[in-house]
């Protein structure tokens, strides 16, 4: 790489960080929440066509939800930036119950772990996760 | 080899100004069109892509010049004398781009390189700059080689490719809804390209055009944007992460894992079959997603 290339790269990086800073400074962005059970089911359906969710455990703040279909399969939906991302809740997902909170740790490290405040429902959904391991 | 300037370098200031203009429009129209971490990811991916391109640029040019020595026709580069060849080159380069782009969505090996560009759930001008790091490794330059064999000088082809790339920048926006009907009929537009970035089953695997949408209409891959179905952007399995490295290599990692675990007779298929293919049918390709979606909806009127 020549000096000219390095200068060009340096200028590009300055421009990149300036634009990203400007996006934040201008207040662009959103605070996406899962509004209700129907919204969670729609998001799960968008993530997997034909999923057909029937039951939902929604985090109290609406950051995430677990959606279950008639076949017993579950899908975790969580906010990501201005949008949402989803992953199936299968045998590889680790669930940890702490009173009203259920934490799901996904096998995909970049997706991370998600803690849902589910109130009294937390125990029931934790038990469903345990059933996955038994089944 | 004749030398021509790289038009993309001259377009960069305009890219930045248009980006800021689009941000100002978003501030009034819809703040959710931008997200700082997403924009930073897109722009960093674009910057590293430029570095990767510079590192392998000499090899690509070398290969082009080598292939060019077997050219069939003698075509000059002087515009006054060879203006028709310039126009023809631009058209054929766009056709080559269509072939590349369609393959990039239908063959997992090429998709692994191209997926970077689709990995944002946003659709704005910063998305346009979210470009591949591994284009050379995935051999995508092969699609342009026939142009050199015909006899178009490498400098002419690379210049046309640069113009093609510049054209594709401005169509990555939600700020422009529709353009005049005649323009939408011939050219790739923000509306057509929004469809291309869509993950709605209706919109999957459509509109591969670079500059001229006519290729999609000719080869049956055109889908019109519908006002009653807003486009959802990204990839079928959304990344759910702003990790730059992961965005760049996740599909390559996926291929490596699949090839490692697959039975011997299926190993190659995990590289050359369509994204989502699996030997036991446990995953969904775009075709199966479309089938499931079609099965669960009533018949409807076609789009205008």
Image (tube, grey):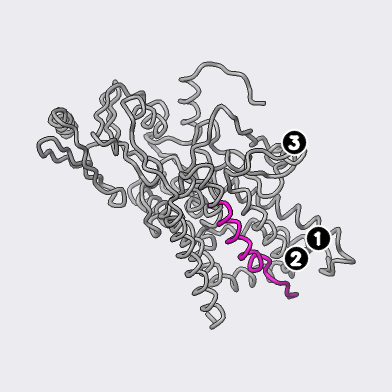
Chain of the residue on which disc 1 is drawn: B
Q: Is residue B72 above or below residue B301?
A: below
On residue B86, the disc is 1
Q: Which residue is mark 3?
A: B181
Query: For the residues marked 1 and 3, what is the alpha-carbon distance in whole angstroms?
Result: 27 Å
Image x and y of residue B272, in percent: 50, 47
Q: Callout 2: 10 Å neighbours few (<14), some, many (20+)?
A: many
Same chain assignment for discs 1 and 3: yes
Seen at 46% across and 31% down, the residue is: B289
Distance, label 1 to label 2, CA atoms, is 7 Å
Q: Is residue B291 above or below residue A84?
A: above
Q: Residues within 10 Å of mark 1 (few under 14, many from 20)?
A: many
Indicate which label's residue lies in the foreground, 1 or 3. 3
Query: Which of the two residues, B153 or B24, is positioned nearer the viewer here?
Result: B24
- Whole-percent x and y of residue B96? 68, 52
Describe the element under mark 1 as helix, strand or loop: helix
Q: Nearer the viewer, mark 2 or mark 3?
A: 3
Residue B19 is one of the magenta-drawn residues: yes
Q: Which mark is residue B156?
A: 2
Tell me the chief SS of the magenta region. helix
Magenta region: which residues?
Answer: B1-23
Image quadrant holding the C terminus of chain A, namely top left
Query: Is residue A134 visible in the rendered structure shown here?
Result: no
Which of the pair A78/B118 is nearer the observer? Answer: A78
Which circle's residue, 2 or 3, is located before the other in the chain? 2
């Amino acid at each position: 790489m020549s000096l000219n290339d390095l200068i060009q790269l340096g200028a590009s990086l300055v421009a990149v960080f300036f634009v990203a800073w400007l996006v934040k400074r201008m207040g662009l962005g959103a605070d996406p929440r899962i509004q209700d059970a129907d919204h969670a089911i729609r998001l799960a359906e968008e993530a997997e066509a034909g999923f057909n969710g029937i039951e939902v455990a929604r985090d109290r703040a609406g950051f995430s939800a677990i959606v279950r279909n008639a076949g017993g399969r579950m899908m975790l939906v969580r906010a990501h930036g201005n949008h949402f991302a989803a992953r199936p809740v299968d045998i590889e997902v680790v669930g940890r119950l702490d009173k009203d909170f259920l934490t799901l740790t996904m096998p995909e490290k970049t997706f991370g772990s998600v803690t849902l405040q589910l109130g009294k429902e937390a125990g029931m959904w934790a038990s469903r996760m345990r059933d996955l391991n038994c089944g | 080899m004749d030398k021509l300037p790289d038009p993309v370098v001259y377009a960069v200031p305009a890219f930045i100004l248009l980006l800021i203009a689009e941000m100002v429009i978003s501030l009034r129209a819809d703040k959710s069109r931008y997200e700082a971490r997403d924009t930073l990811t897109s722009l960093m991916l674009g910057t590293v892509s430029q570095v990767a391109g510079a590192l392998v640029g000499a090899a690509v040019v070398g290969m082009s010049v080598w292939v060019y020595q077997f050219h069939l026709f003698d075509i000059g580069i002087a515009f006054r004398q060879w203006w028709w060849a310039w126009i023809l080159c631009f058209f054929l380069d766009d056709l080559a781009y269509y072939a590349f782009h369609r393959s990039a969505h239908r063959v997992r090996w090429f998709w692994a390189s191209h997926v970077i560009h689709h990995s944002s759930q946003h659709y704005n001008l910063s998305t346009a700059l979210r470009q591949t790091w591994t284009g050379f490794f995935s051999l995508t330059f092969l699609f342009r080689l026939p142009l050199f064999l015909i006899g178009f000088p490498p400098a002419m082809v690379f210049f046309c490719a640069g113009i093609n790339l510049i054209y594709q920048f401005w169509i990555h926006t939600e700020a422009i809804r529709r353009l005049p009907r005649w323009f939408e009929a011939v050219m790739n537009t923000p509306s057509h390209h929004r469809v291309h970035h869509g993950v709605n089953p209706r919109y999957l695997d459509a509109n591969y055009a670079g500059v001229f949408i006519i290729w999609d209409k000719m080869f049956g891959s055109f889908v019109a944007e519908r006002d009653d179905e807003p486009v959802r952007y990204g990839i079928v399995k959304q990344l759910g992460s702003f990790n730059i490295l992961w965005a760049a290599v996740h599909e390559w990692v996926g291929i490596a894992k699949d090839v490692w675990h697959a039975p011997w007779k299926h190993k190659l298929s995990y590289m050359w079959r369509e994204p989502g293919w699996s030997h036991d049918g446990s995953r969904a390709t775009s075709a199966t997603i479309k089938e499931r979606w079609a099965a669960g909806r009533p018949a409807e009127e076609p789009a205008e």
